[in-house]
Image (cartoon, helix red, strand yellow):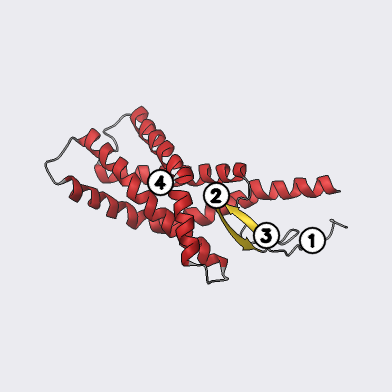
Amino acid sequence: MNHSKSLFIKCSQIVHLRGGSYYPYTTKVGKKEGMMKLPTTKKESLQFGLIMCFGMVLVMTIYNFYLNGTIGKMTFIEGISDFFIGFVIAFILDMFMVGPNAKKIALKLTVNTTKKRYTVLAISICMVLGMAFFMSIYGLASTYIHNGFTFNSVVADYFAVFGKNLIVALPLQIIIMGPLVRYIFTKYIKSNRVDIGLNIEN
């Protein structure tokens, strides 16, 4: 088979979506790459999850620092520590708890559609809802640590934090971070695997 020309492989595959969810899609290899190159191995799932969590947690940490008025009041080391703790918690939730369950729910909701963009969108929304739910607990605890415990209702404080996180995290994930991370993954990770595979076959 001549791999110097554009090679289009159309086949119904079962593709692994970041740790446990599967759906069939069409892969294109050659000059025109497939639009949705997603993780197909555990290693790729780990790489994808690391990049996504890093970007989301970084932006949301800065956003919460701004909301809490802690920018300028905490040291650089304290800021890095908060980010690192949040990143570790988010990554664990993403890979082992929120991620797998969000994908199962999203796939059930989109089982009757053949447009994979809807599946990806549903997964993103379910992921954000789950991550915002749990990470808001960490955010509230961090607020109490830096600003002191208030005498307001903890439940009211939690839902205030959750609402503020959700209205930023949802568009951040769908409009910016999701497409950006998929582009980085396709450009620098997935495409390299395809090129290596073609070179081995040659």
Query: What amino acid type should be assigned to the residue bearing mark 4?
Result: Val
Give the spatial CA distance, label 2 vs label 3: 15 Å
According to the picture, the residue beneath numbered tag 3 turns out to be: 13
Q: Splitting the image into 4 quarters, where does residue 12 fall?
A: bottom right
Query: Do labels 4 and 3 touch, CB within 8 Å?
Result: no
Q: Earlier in the sequence, mark 2 or mark 3?
A: 3
* Residue 171 badge: none
Q: Earlier in the sequence, mark 4 or mark 3?
A: 3
Q: Residue at x 17, y 37 (%)?
A: 149
Give the spatial CA distance, label 2 vs label 4: 21 Å
Crowd rating for badge 4 (residues with CA inside 10 Å; few <14, some 14–19, many 20+): some
Which quadrant is the N terminus positioned in?
bottom right
* Residue 7 badge: 1
Give the spatial CA distance, label 1 vs label 2: 26 Å
According to the picture, the residue beneath numbered tag 4 turns out to be: 59
Q: Is residue 183 above or below residue 196?
A: below
